[in-house]
Image (spheres, helix red, strand yellow):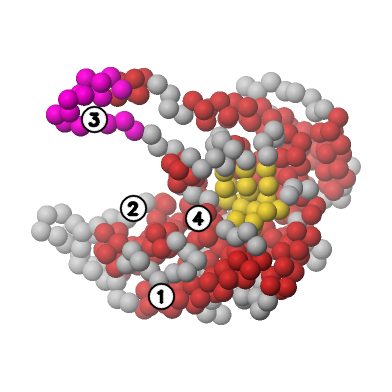
């Protein structure tokens, strides 16, 4: 558990940080070496995820996947859940003691819907009760819990019904996709047809959804169809299917149908549409919605969408061609991501210090 980057100078913890470390240490006693290693690895994962979100400007909202909520809900009866909840709580201590940015936990209507066992609520009182329950479950994180997408109980009740209707629609839609024949002859007059182009044509842009964003749903379903075309269209050796890569493969797994005829991955699509860093960077929204999940497929998709893009162009024949060329040259010689680099330089040593201390605590717990 070597965590300290040799390039980062070490800063000893201050008084408040020492108190937080002592609190963490008390929970590590009695854990096996295997559990200590897993605990450290999970906590490090969360800290690194936070550091990537810290690169953007504004308060950070840690948008919780339902799996994290379930870890806290069942931690008293399931050892594996308890270890995950402890790792996330420890990460929250890093946020509290080492970060200088306002940071909150956040839940969406979909996370609440899944927490309820995929059911809407029958009354405003029931909606209020589930929110109170969630805040109680997450109290040990010592971070404030806020909501994303609604401002009051009445809105939450309405959104839960919208999510339920979308869930039923998408279940049927995905079943129809899976039942369809996706074998295609990809031979084209020139070259080979790309499976993703066929998938794009197969899904309308205006799916009749009440809660979910049709663009993101289409984005996910296109990848599912692409993989089905690739799987079933291998018959022509002169026109073998060409896929779009790792992200498409990861996206295609976000909408499986369970044996109980439930569409898995509703929360994944929700976290993708809410926490798309690429979109947030373009829109300059002034705060950061950072997806929180340990699901490998969803984490891979979010990683691919954690990108920044800047560009400068020029118009052919423009009367301002000289000025445009000058701007383009200046852009090529500049660092358009200097602000992100500066924020990274702030959080990296704090992250290294915390992980160094955490590794020390784990080693001490191991030899007791």
Mark 3 or mark 2: which is in front?
3
Q: Are marks 4 and 3 in contact (CB under 8 Å)?
A: no
Neighbourhood count class around disc 2 (C-alpha, 10 Å): few under 14, some 14–19, many 20 upward: few
- Residue for badge 2: 244
Q: Earlier in the sequence, mark 2 or mark 4?
A: 2
Q: Which sits in the foreground, 181 or 274?
A: 274
Residue 15 coordinates in the image, percent (x, y): 86, 30
Where is 158 relative to 14, above or below? below
How far separated are the C-alphas under marks 1 and 2? 23 Å
Q: Which residues are magenta?
A: 311-327
**Residue 285 in magenta stretch:** no
Q: Are marks 3 and 2 in contact (CB under 8 Å)?
A: no
How far separated are the C-alphas under marks 2 and 4? 18 Å
Mark 1 or mark 2: which is in front?
1
Residue 92 quadrant: top right
Q: Earlier in the sequence, mark 1 or mark 2?
A: 1
- Residue for badge 3: 314
- Residue for badge 1: 173
Asked if residue 45 shows in the view, the reply is no
How far separated are the C-alphas under marks 3 and 1? 43 Å
Residue 366 coordinates in the image, percent (x, y): 82, 42
Residue 272 is marked as 4
How far separated are the C-alphas under marks 4 and 3? 33 Å
């Amino acid at each position: 558990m070597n965590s300290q980057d040799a390039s980062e100078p070490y800063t000893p913890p201050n008084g408040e940080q020492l108190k937080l470390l002592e609190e963490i240490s008390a929970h590590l006693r009695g854990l096996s070496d295997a559990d200590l290693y897993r605990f450290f690895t999970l906590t490090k994962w969360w800290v690194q995820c936070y550091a990537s979100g810290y690169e953007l400007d504004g308060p950070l909202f840690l948008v919780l996947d339902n799996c994290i909520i379930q870890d806290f809900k069942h931690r008293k009866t399931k050892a594996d859940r308890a270890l995950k909840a402890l790792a996330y709580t420890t990460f929250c201590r890093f946020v509290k003691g080492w970060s200088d940015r306002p940071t909150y936990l956040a839940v969406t209507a979909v996370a609440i819907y899944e927490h309820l066992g995929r059911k809407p609520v029958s009354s405003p009182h029931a909606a209020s009760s589930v929110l109170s329950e969630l805040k109680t479950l997450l109290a040990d994180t010592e971070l404030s819990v806020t909501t994303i997408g609604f401002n009051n109980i009445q809105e939450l009740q309405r959104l839960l019904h919208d999510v339920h209707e979308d869930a039923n629609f998408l279940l049927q839609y995905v079943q129809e996709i899976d039942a369809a024949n996706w074998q295609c002859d990809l031979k084209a007059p020139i070259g080979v047809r790309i499976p993703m182009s066929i998938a794009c044509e197969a899904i309308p842009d205006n799916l009749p959804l009440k809660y979910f964003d049709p663009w993101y749903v289409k984005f996910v379903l296109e990848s599912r169809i692409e993989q089905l075309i690739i799987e079933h269209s291998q018959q022509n050796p002169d026109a073998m299917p060409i896929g779009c890569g790792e992200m498409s493969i990861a996206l295609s797994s976000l909408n499986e149908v369970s044996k109980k005829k439930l569409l898995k991955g509703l929360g994944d699509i929700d976290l993708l549409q809410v926490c798309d860093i690429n979109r947030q960077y373009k829109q300059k929204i002034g705060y950061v919605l950072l997806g929180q999940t340990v699901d490998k497929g969803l984490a891979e998709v979010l990683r691919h969408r954690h990108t920044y893009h800047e560009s400068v162009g020029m118009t052919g024949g423009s009367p301002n061609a000289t000025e445009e060329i000058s701007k383009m040259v200046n852009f090529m010689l500049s660092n358009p991501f200097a602000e992100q680099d500066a924020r990274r330089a702030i959080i990296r040593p704090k992250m290294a210090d915390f992980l160094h201390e955490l590794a020390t605590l784990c080693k001490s717990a191991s030899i007791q």
